[in-house]
Image: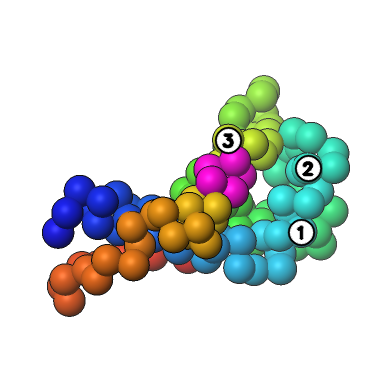
Amino acid sequence: MTLSGDRGERELRRLRALYRALGDETRLRVIGILAESGPMPVGQLSARVLLSQPLISWHLRILRLAGLIETRKQGRETLCQLRPAAFEELRELEARLISGTSGMGVTAPASAEVPDVG
């Protein structure tokens, strides 16, 4: 496979991870809330989306693994916030995909596996 094809495969896997993380209404709702309100404690976010703490934590883990949010401890709370750079990366990957400059059209070997984020 060419260097362009390798890059195309990496970009394809990255797009898939981002789309899978964003392919759930609850996670989209979380993204919307964080975009409107800014960083927010997990407990408050849980109350806003009407989910239990374990369930919201599961969704947040998927978003964090995809690089769409970051979390940090602040005292006894965990704050969540968006990673704007991840959304810029998504726009760039999509632009290369639809412009035909991504190299994603190169066929991968049959044994290539794509990691799953959720």
Q: Which residue is mark 3?
A: 85
Q: Which mark is residue 54?
A: none
Badges 2 and 3: C-beta atoms under 8 Å apart? Answer: no
Q: Amino acid at mark 1?
A: Arg
Q: Marks 1/3: CA distance?
A: 19 Å
Name the residue at 71% across, 64% down.
26
| Above-or-below relation of 44 to 47 | above
Q: Amino acid at mark 2?
A: Ala
47 to the left or right of 68 = right
Residue 113 horizontal/vertical position (percent): 25, 67
Work out whether residue 5 can be spotted.
Answer: yes
Q: Marks 2/1: CA distance?
A: 10 Å
Of marks 2 and 1, which one's residue comes earlier in the chain?
1
19 to the left or right of 56 = left
Name the residue at 61% across, 28% down.
73
Q: Amino acid at mark 3?
A: Ala
Q: Which residue is mark 2?
A: 35
